[in-house]
Image: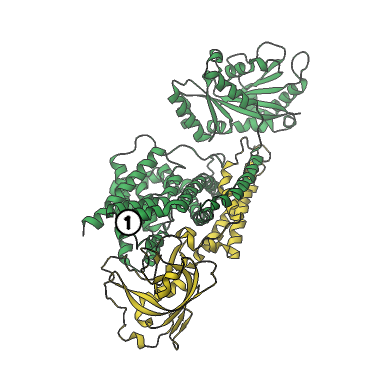
Chain colours: A yellow, B green
């Protein structure tokens, strides 16, 4: 026989679980979760919301069993994230990421055995003159005019594709928009990277990602300003490794693009 | 108006009556009309012989057979009043024997007609420092439940302050945040003692003071927190502290960690509910080598990151898996599972050398860390006791439905318990990341491989990234750090970081966590350094 009486602890636990679950569902459905997480985390949000809702529902069965020392402090575990989500705050921007940048290949990091200096991609001898077909799932390739327009959705895939099959694309004109990233240890004189912030799991792992661009006016560009770049792809070399470079044809100011690019878009 | 009820619990002979008598003879309590009730024949007469005090004694047998009769008689006594002048009672004091579940008394007091007449105000538990440890181990759930229901504990029989601290720790493992004081402050000669007198005064103030309902306190806290943050965040940004960045990082890590933590607590609760200790004892390999192998295999097969592996680690230790094997599992699972390897493969542009190096060095380090616990088992306990105070009683239902319900509740209790450490760890990590990360990078310029390895490992500790995403961050440091340092980051970060240390403190002693963290650091450092700098 259990004593009857309202249990504030169960009430608060169920309330916090429901509120948190609703927020997770809202973030997942509206797409706002993309400010914090990558697209592949979406199913996990639904999973977490489901568990929370089951807990809240199970709690209502125990709502009227009296408890002598109800405790509420532990519910701050959900209160703090809930408040921080609800209170408006700015999104992460270019100035918030202060490391180097990543590009497509394994340059500079891998053991020397996996990639040798001077290696070329398979079938590269006469690759540049072959008609190129767009790799599956990549939009923006125009073989007739030898142009590549890199969009948001397959930004990282394009960069990887260009690095992996550089010989196929040398001479192509690439259009890409990004913010200016340059500095000691990252770029040399007359160079900058039109970069985007790329997320692989969550906003804590944001890194800058882009192709190094040679541009005579690079010194006049300011860090973090947004530019639209048109440049011709060429082969460069970085510490003995082959890598992709852009030789700028035009660099024009551009409107900042909201949001990030993701390593895995699905 | 409802009469406040004060309950004193404790075993027979623990001194409940002496304590009550002592408290009620305080000068300012003397004028109060007090009804006391006992459910056993006390060893001592409870009330002083004066006309505003009265005592009701109920035989234990009546409690077992006809609790309704007790409810009726007690309400009669309350209504009738005290003494020849039928004075309305100001307080009711009940002594409750430690052998009976507290719940029984609670439900009697909540039953009409008593329900409208009186309400529980405070519960005080009298514990004996010499016997508490043994009693908690052996008397079933009545004693822990009593302790968990109490507001105060008064400890008798302490010899020295160390013993009081130990007993306080024991009591708080059952009832976190409980107020515990030494019984000596209530003795007659303590009244003039310079240190006992203020403690006693504070106890009395708290005992009779009003309290806020926890629900209103919580909402008040929520509103205050929101207002403080609304005011502080812009101010912080103005003085150059990137508060907005910290919020983003915090939310990113939390939103990513919560689903994995949920998977972890569900799996670990499944271990708690469905796996018996005997099954572990008979099935798990006794042999050290076979145990390690089983741990590495389990780590490979369970696609869990560090948020999930720590609750599972705790359940495994609690169920009797040998510590070396359990530590190896905890260290290896977040480094070598398939999801982590795949994300490392992508992040390093399909470089199998990095993937294989990370897995191999991770396994070697984890096994070595585990072995140190076989060579020198920790002195004292690694696990802290109890913890399961939010979910309620620890009954063991037999039916599948009952077990499922228990699993849900256990997982929820575990979530609240571990979640607070996750939140604290993430807050610290977000603050560090937003303020001083460039320090690590600039400290590296011109340093040798050992220094940059140590710097990257320290960064892995501070960043507290999920092991399934840290590879991309490691990749972004490739320009500034040599590969040996990146590997140290990739191997050490998942095994130990701020968030993991915080998660571990939900169930393990500080001593154990510090030992584990230091061992992990030195083992990972040596293994990675040997691989890259000495073996060419």
Q: Residue, x 55% and y 52% (percent of image)?
A: B238
The foreground one among B355 and B123 is B355
Above or below: residue B459 compared with residue B393: below
Q: Quadrant of the C terminus of chain B?
A: bottom left
Residue under label 1, please give it: B445
Q: Quadrant of the N terminus of chain B?
A: top right
Above or below: residue A146 compared with residue B188: below
Q: Position of residue A32 (x, y in %)?
A: 58, 63
Dot 1 surroundings within 10 Å: few (below 14), some, or many (20 or more)?
A: few
Q: Residue, x 56% and y 60% (percent of image)?
A: A46
The foreground one among A237 and B160 is A237
Residue B13 in the figure: left or right of residue A236: right
Above or below: residue B284 compared with residue B143: below
Q: Position of residue B167 (x, y in %)?
A: 47, 28
Q: Residue, x 71% and y 33% (percent of image)?
A: B111
Determine the chain carrying the residue at label 1. Answer: B
């Amino acid at each position: 026989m259990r004593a009857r009486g309202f249990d504030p602890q169960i009430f608060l636990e169920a309330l916090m679980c429901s509120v948190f679950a609703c927020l997770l569902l809202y973030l997942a459905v509206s797409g706002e979760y993309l400010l914090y997480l990558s697209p592949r985390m979406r199913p996990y949000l639904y999973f977490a919301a489901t568990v929370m809702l089951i807990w809240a529902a199970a709690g209502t069965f125990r709502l009227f069993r009296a408890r002598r020392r109800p405790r509420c402090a532990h519910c701050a575990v959900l209160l703090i994230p809930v408040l921080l989500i609800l209170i408006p705050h700015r999104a992460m921007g270019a100035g918030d990421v202060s490391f180097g940048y990543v590009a497509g290949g394994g340059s500079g990091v891998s053991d020397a055995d996996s990639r040798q200096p001077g290696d070329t991609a398979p079938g590269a001898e006469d690759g540049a003159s072959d008609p190129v077909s767009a790799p599956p799932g990549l939009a923006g390739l125009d073989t007739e005019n030898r142009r590549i327009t890199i969009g948001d959705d397959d930004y990282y895939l394009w960069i990887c594709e260009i690095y992996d099959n550089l010989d196929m694309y040398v001479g192509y004109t690439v259009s890409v928009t990004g913010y200016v990233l340059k500095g000691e240890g990252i770029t040399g004189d007359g160079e900058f990277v039109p970069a985007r912030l790329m997320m692989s799991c969550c906003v804590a792992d944001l890194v800058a990602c882009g192709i190094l661009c040679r541009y005579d006016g690079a010194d006049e560009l300011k860090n973090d300003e947004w530019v639209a770049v048109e440049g011709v792809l060429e082969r460069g070399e970085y510490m003995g490794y082959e890598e992709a470079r852009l030789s700028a044809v035009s660099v024009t100011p551009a409107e900042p693009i909201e949001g990030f690019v993701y390593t895995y878009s699905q | 108006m409802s009469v406040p009820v004060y309950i004193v619990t404790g075993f027979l002979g623990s001194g409940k009556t002496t304590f009550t008598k002592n408290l009620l003879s305080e000068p300012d309590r003397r004028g109060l009309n007090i009804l006391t009730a006992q459910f056993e024949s006390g060893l001592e007469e409870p009330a002083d012989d004066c006309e505003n005090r009265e005592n009701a004694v109920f035989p234990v047998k009546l409690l077992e057979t006809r609790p309704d009769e007790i409810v009726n008689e007690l309400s009669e006594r309350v209504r009738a009043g005290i003494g020849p002048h039928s004075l309305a009672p100001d307080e009711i004091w009940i002594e409750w024997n430690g052998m009976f579940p507290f719940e029984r008394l609670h439900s009697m007091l909540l039953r009409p007609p008593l329900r409208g007449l009186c309400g529980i105000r405070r519960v005080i538990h009298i514990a004996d420092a010499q016997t508490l440890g043994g009693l908690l181990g052996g008397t079933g759930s009545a004693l822990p439940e009593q302790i968990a229901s109490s507001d105060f504990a008064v400890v008798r029989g302490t010899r020295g302050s160390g013993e009081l601290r130990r007993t306080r720790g024991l009591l708080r493992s059952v009832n976190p945040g409980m107020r515990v004081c030494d019984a000596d402050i209530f003795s007659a000669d303590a009244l003039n003692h310079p240190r006992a007198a203020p403690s006693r005064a504070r106890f009395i103030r708290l005992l009779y003071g009003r309290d806020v309902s926890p629900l209103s306190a919580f909402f008040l806290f929520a509103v205050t927190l929101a207002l403080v943050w609304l005011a502080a965040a812009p101010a912080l940004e103005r003085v150059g502290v990137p508060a907005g960045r910290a919020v983003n990082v915090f939310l990113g890590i939390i939103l990513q960690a919560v689903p994995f933590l949920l998977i972890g607590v569900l799996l670990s609760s499944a271990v708690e509910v469905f796996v018996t200790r005997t099954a572990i004892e008979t099935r798990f390999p006794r042999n050290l080598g076979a145990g390690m192998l089983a741990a590495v295999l389990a780590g490979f097969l369970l696609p869990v990151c560090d948020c999930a592996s720590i609750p599972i680690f705790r359940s495994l230790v609690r169920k009797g898996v040998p510590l070396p094997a359990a530590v190896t599992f905890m260290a290896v699972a977040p480094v070598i599972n398939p999801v982590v390897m795949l994300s490392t493969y992508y992040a390093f542009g399909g470089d199998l050398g990095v993937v294989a190096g990370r897995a191999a060095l991770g396994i070697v380090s984890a096994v070595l860390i585990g072995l140190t616990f076989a060579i020198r088992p920790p002195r004292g306990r690694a696990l802290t006791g109890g913890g399961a105070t939010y979910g309620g009683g620890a009954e063991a239902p037999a039916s599948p439905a009952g077990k499922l319900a228990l699993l849900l509740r256990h997982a929820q209790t575990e979530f609240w318990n571990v979640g607070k450490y996750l939140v604290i760890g993430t807050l610290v990590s977000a603050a560090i990341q937003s303020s001083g990360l460039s320090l690590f990078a600039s400290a590296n310029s011109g340093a040798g491989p050992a220094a940059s390895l140590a710097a990257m490992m320290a960064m892995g500790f501070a960043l507290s990234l999920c092991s399934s995403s840290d590879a991309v961050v490691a990749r972004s440091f490739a320009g500034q750090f040599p590969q040996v340092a990146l590997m140290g980051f990739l191997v050490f970060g998942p095994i130990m970081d701020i968030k993991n240390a915080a998660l571990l403190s939900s169930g393990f002693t500080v001593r154990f966590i510090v030992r584990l963290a230091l061992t992990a650091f030195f083992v990972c450092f040596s293994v990675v350094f040997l691989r890259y700098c000495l073996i060419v």
